Image: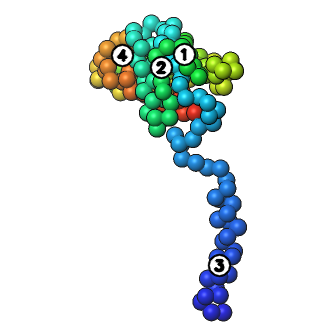
Amino acid sequence: MTRVSRLLTLAFCLLPFALSFSACGYALAGRGSFLPDYIKTIGVPQFTNSTTTVNLDQIVTAQVRQELAGRGGKYRVMPEATGDAIITGTITAMTLTPVVTNASQLATRYAVTVVANVEFRDTHTNKVLWSNPSMQFREEYPVSSGTSVADTNAFFGQDTTALTRLAQNFARSVVTSILENF
């Protein structure tokens, strides 16, 4: 068998395999959108904060707006409950749990869990396109050694950038869930 015929045989054998991968439906995350084409403007009014963490609603809402606006400029984001669609949310809980302790039994790493009720509604049809009544987001953060943290306000008072990082990651999760329909 000549070299050319071996290559052709190999190509014909691999062709069905290659075609099956090209049609499997995978796409790059953050690129797709399963929203109706007429949705161009999305309202994101201030989330409601049912927790005791100060400014959590403002920071989370700002990050959701920013994440949505940063998705290729496809949508115009409005700060009120107007538009072709609306994202509403209520942050129902935020807990702080020690996950790592040192030899003195002081926590050196905490897990922060945010629970929210988020809904995405098409205003033209008044139909809910996506919702999660108990969306949970969890992230871990280190704390200064020898520091005891009693609540989330004290924790975020020590590390103000942690709250922003938490809100950014939470917003990314919400917007990805809505746009990619996961």
Where is mark 3, residue-wise? Answer: 10
Count neighbours of disc 4 (C-alpha within 10 A) and say few if under 14, some if 14 to 19, many if 20 or more: many
User: Residue placed farthest to the bottom in the image?
Assistant: 1
Three-letter residue code for mark 2: Met
| Distance between mark 4 and mark 2 Cα atoms | 32 Å
Three-letter residue code for mark 3: Leu
| Distance between mark 3 and mark 4 Cα atoms | 61 Å
Secondary-structure class at tag 3: helix
Q: Nearer the viewer, mark 3 or mark 1?
A: 1
Count neighbours of disc 1 (C-alpha within 10 A) and say few if under 14, some if 14 to 19, many if 20 or more: some
Q: Closer to the camera, 137 or 129?
A: 129
Quarter of the image with the N terminus is bottom right
| 173 relative to 11, above or below | above
| Distance between mark 4 and mark 1 Cα atoms | 35 Å
| Distance between mark 1 and mark 2 Cα atoms | 7 Å
Residue ID at (68%, 81%): 9
N-term mark: 4 or 2? 2
Where is mark 1, residue-wise? Answer: 82
Residue ID at (69%, 60%): 20
Locate residue 76, reporting x and y percent: 48, 27
Residue ID at (69%, 74%): 13
User: Residue placed farthest to the front in the image?
Assistant: 38
